[in-house]
Image: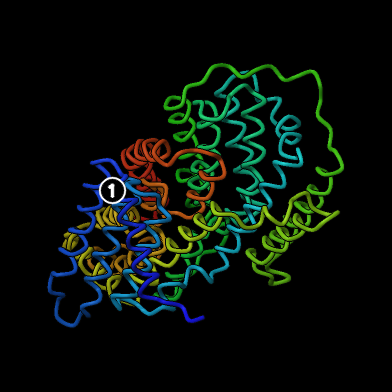
Amino acid sequence: MPIDLPKLATQAGKHWVENIRKLGPWRQATLVAAAVLALAIAMVPPPAGTPATAMTALGLAAATVLLWATVAIQQPYTAILFLTATWLSGTASLAATTSGFFSSTLLLVFGGLLIGLAAERSGFGAFIAQKFFGRFRTSYGQLVLGVLVGTTLLSFFVPANMGRLAITIPIVLALADDAGYPRGSAGHYGLVMVTVVGNFTVALAILPANLLNIMVVGTGESLYGIRFSYLEYLYLCAPVLGLAKAALVWWVVTRWFPAPQPKAEPEKKLTLGPDARRVAIILAITIALWSTDVIHGIRPGVVAVLSGLACLTPRLGVLKPADAIDGKKILLLTWIGTVLSLGAVLTESGASSLVSHALSELAGVTGQSPFYGHLAIAYLAAALTAIATIGGAVPVMVAAAGDIAEATGLPMKSAVLSVTSGMSVLALPFVAAPIAVGLTMGRVPMAVATRFMLVLAAATCLVIVPLNALWWRLVGVVP
């Protein structure tokens, strides 16, 4: 029987209209504002030599970011709107529009969700929480510190942020429950936020620990031929972007999410049951493969999926086949895939090049000092990341960093690294896929996370970015 596409489209349209009518007035107003914003930007004539698709891409990206930031509708539905509008308008090819859905990162997300669910369901997370965090339970502040230290140390051994989340989120959720912080409490939010946002930002100081670090350094190498060694990167970034940022995260978390003293460690000690032992073996093999990927060459995403499938295997894993695919996972993967595709859409449409040159002019760097150039790159990177996500901001800002370096006399190596300093700001949850995934796994509402991240971002702009600039000036990286 042939498929009646017009009928299906009509039914889908009616379904969307009915759902929009059910939204509150402010959500409807936000949807209208997003549509007007997209049309207004798309109708602006592009500069000479720039394809018209660049303005359309910028309009769609701006509207999408507005809806993601306000959560006027659920982020996955906004992602579907972006994908549909991008494809139907011819703004980018289907390959670019769906590129994020074929990335190794999305495989990491899917595998990580399965690993995390297995660790939680088997009791392995609760066992680790009681075994290794008991010494930090004298106060809530110490508990937050223990999680921050533990996740940071793990960053040296598990280079994939998604992999670390798969390991740590079930443990931290079990820790919160055991310490007397139920789901939805300030203590629960605080422990998850330090695990997700805290670890992501602090791990920026360790070269292979985040995909963002690798993207910045890799783009700098491809554009300008510069390279960073592991120890050089650690020496320059660890003191401020690592240690000082960790202290700031701890301070903001303990004050933004104040919680009472945790419950005393229970006298009854948990033991590893058969299910938990099998999950522990799967997890140990997974970590070993992640840590040695430079030897065997198997991508972290493939390792994560294989581990997830092992958790689904009868008599070996602890999950049921139905746990692999459900509505929530599909929507989450749709959202993350779209976030990962956004950068490719901006690049192919010409929007990235347009924004890169515009940022160089906006910075007003002509005749300014190298120190000014460094700060300009850092703050522009922070602002652009909030608009275009990490995937879209990295190629744009690294390209713009070259123009700013040339205008101010800032060494090219320092200019590229300045992008990392700015991206440590991270003002919104959706700008980095691991943060969005971690918050979902940790059961933290996006509205709660957004308020916290805005406060942390403001503090980072006022304290960490200038302090890091002074550190680099002290060691001669920024003249």
Q: Please give the name of the residue rendered at 57% of the width and 44% of the height, measured from the top-left corner.
A: 441
What is the basis of the colouring in this image? Answer: rainbow
Q: Is residue 260 left or right of residue 478?
A: right
Seen in the picture, residue 23 relative to 322 is either above or below; the reply is: above
Q: Position of residue 424 (x, y in %)?
A: 41, 49
Q: Is residue 446 left or right of residue 35?
A: right
Q: Position of residue 416 (x, y in %)?
A: 39, 63
Seen in the picture, residue 64 relative to 296 is either above or below; the reply is: above
Q: Please give the name of the residue rendered at 23% of the width and 41% of the height, measured from the top-left corner.
A: 25
Q: Quadrant of the C terminus?
A: bottom left
- The local secondary structure at tag 1 comes to helix
Is residue 427 in view from this perspective?
A: yes
Q: How many circles with numbers are drawn on the protein? A: 1
Q: Please give the name of the residue rendered at 45% of the width and 72% of the height, measured from the top-left corner.
A: 98
**Residue at image mark 1:** 21
What is the residue that sits farthest to the front in this orientation? 1
Q: Which is more toward the observer, 292 or 427?
A: 427
Q: Quadrant of residue 300?
A: bottom right
Q: Is residue 42 left or right of residue 344?
A: left
Q: Which is more toward the observer, 199 or 330?
A: 330
Q: Position of residue 307 (x, y in %)?
A: 73, 59
Q: Which is more toward the observer, 372 or 169?
A: 169
Q: Is residue 7 left or right of residue 231?
A: left
